[in-house]
Amino acid sequence: MLFTWWNGSTFGTWLNNKLHGEHVGTDFQGNKYYRSTKKIPAGANSPFAGRERRWVIYNGNNDSSRVPAEWHGWLHNSYDGVPESHLPPPRIWEVEYTPNATGTAKAHHPAGSLAAGGHRPAATGDYEAWSPEA
């Protein structure tokens, strides 16, 4: 775990979090969110000039689709307060998080794709090709 970055943080990231970061919250998946303890001056040549730097340390694989919408908004400085203060009550139609399946056996393969066999359904006759002469 000392030198891996794909399932957590490296020693250097851990040290940076301890020295320059403030833990502000943890989501339901165990991802931890941090902000910098000092702000970069507004006139500085930095993309973070005038605002605080924010980041996430994933609990498990580094996959940005694992960041819930409320924390995504916080990471991108959409609002200052941590998401717990902005969460609406859960809706009955909301589904649980499922990981990004790209590159796995559970990935979606539409009809006609090579991964689905390469055969698409026959045309039904309701399509007429466009012709520039018409």
Image (spheres, helix red, strand yellow):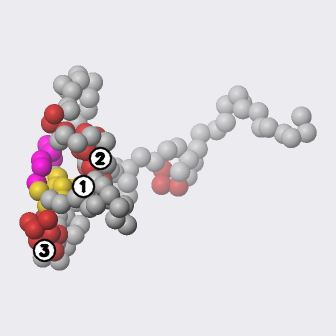
Q: Which residue is mark 2?
A: 77
Q: Quadrant of the N terminus?
A: bottom left
Judging by the rendered image, the residue that carries numbered circle 1 is 52
For discs 2 and 3, the disc positioned in front in the rendered view:
2
**Image location (x, y in percent) of residue 109:** 46, 48
Residue type at mark 3: give it. Answer: Phe
Q: Residue 73, percent across and down? A: 29, 43
Q: Dot 3 corresponds to which residue?
A: 11
- In the orientation shown, which residue stands out farthest toward the left? 18
Q: Is residue 16 above or below residue 105?
A: below
Q: 72 or 99, which lies in front?
A: 72
- Which three-letter amino acid code belongs to the residue tagged 1? Glu
Q: Is residue 86 magenta?
A: no
Q: Are marks 1 and 2 in contact (CB under 8 Å)?
A: yes
Q: Is residue 24 magenta?
A: yes
At mark 2, the secondary structure is: loop
Q: Is residue 21 visible?
A: yes
For the residues labelled 3 and 1, the Cα–Cα distance comes to: 23 Å
Magenta stretch, residue numbers:
23-30
